[in-house]
Amino acid sequence: MASNTVNMDALEARYGSTHRKDRWWVEPLLTGSGLFLFVVYSTVSAMLLGGGTAESPILAYESGPYLSPFFEPLIHPGWLPIWVSPALFILWAPLGFRTTCYYYRRTYYRAYFLSPPGCAVREPASSYSGESTFPLIIQNLHRWFMYVALVFVPILFYGAVKSFWLDGEFGVGIGSVILTLNAGFLTMYTIGCHSLRHWVAGGLNHFSKSRYRRVRYWLWEIFTVANEKHRRWAWISLTWVGLSDLYVRLVANGAITDFNTWSNF
């Protein structure tokens, strides 16, 4: 009996030890790989500005009425050096919002920091300080990034609307549909944010005590529906924004043809 107790204590003290019988390591492996691929792609894509000449440049992130969501809205002041990507003015906001997102924190804590690698699986750290010390205390900025993300929602829809117009002519192209869906998916991910849901209804014991109870309850119900599938919207929106950028780039570089109703595009 004593020998079995010693063996069990030794097992539970070893990193990765668990009584689970399932393949608990599959989820952090897949999610960690997915995040890594997106970070690599988005970083490279944001730096690819195009080619051509100074008089006739080829903007790899823009084609006709289509603009890559990585660059929406396009901020390109005249003093900006040609080698500096306009995406730097944009990507800090969605990057901060997703990096501090409660779901993504769970994902990369498990996949990259093994903290913990899975439920009921021993982690390598011998102590836990939470997110109260640097650099993890920066995660508390999530609500502020949420405010910025809410500003980007109508901006993305504005870009989607623009994708239906070319030289004053209304039309529909595959790119128009892709960019519109991108705005929709990112909206569902944003309004499913835990902080946003708490913002509209947090601090209330009863909705009836709020001056704007009907509006707040209505918003809370909508955000709750999105919040219940927050993980799903997180991955759908992440994947789709990458595919949207890729599609615009392929069209801009002539690798594929965009099927549309315009006569001059």
Image: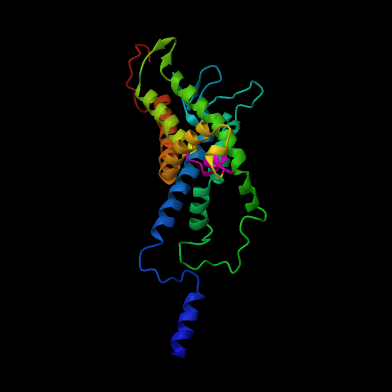
Would residue 138 be seen by someone viewing this image from the given angle? yes
Q: Residue at x 44, y 23 (%)?
A: 160
* Residue found at the far top of this picture: 168
Could you tell me residue 234's position as x and y percent?
45, 42
Residue, x 42% and y 31% (percent of image)?
A: 184
Between 40 and 16, the one nearer to me in the picture:
16
Q: Is residue 55 above or below residue 136?
A: above
Image x and y of residue 66, in percent:
44, 22
Percent across and percent down for residue 179 are 42, 27
* Viewer-nearest residue: 167 or 95: 95
Asked if residue 194 is among those painted magenta in the image, a careful observer would answer: yes
In the displayed structure, would residue 182 be above or below residue 12? above
Q: Which residues are magenta?
A: 192-204
Q: Which quadrant does the C terminus fall into?
A: top left
Residue at the front extreme of this rendering: 208
Q: Nearer the viewer, residue 253 or 262?
A: 262
- Residue drawn 42% across the image and 15% down it: 165
Residue 104 versus residue 221 in the image, above or below: below
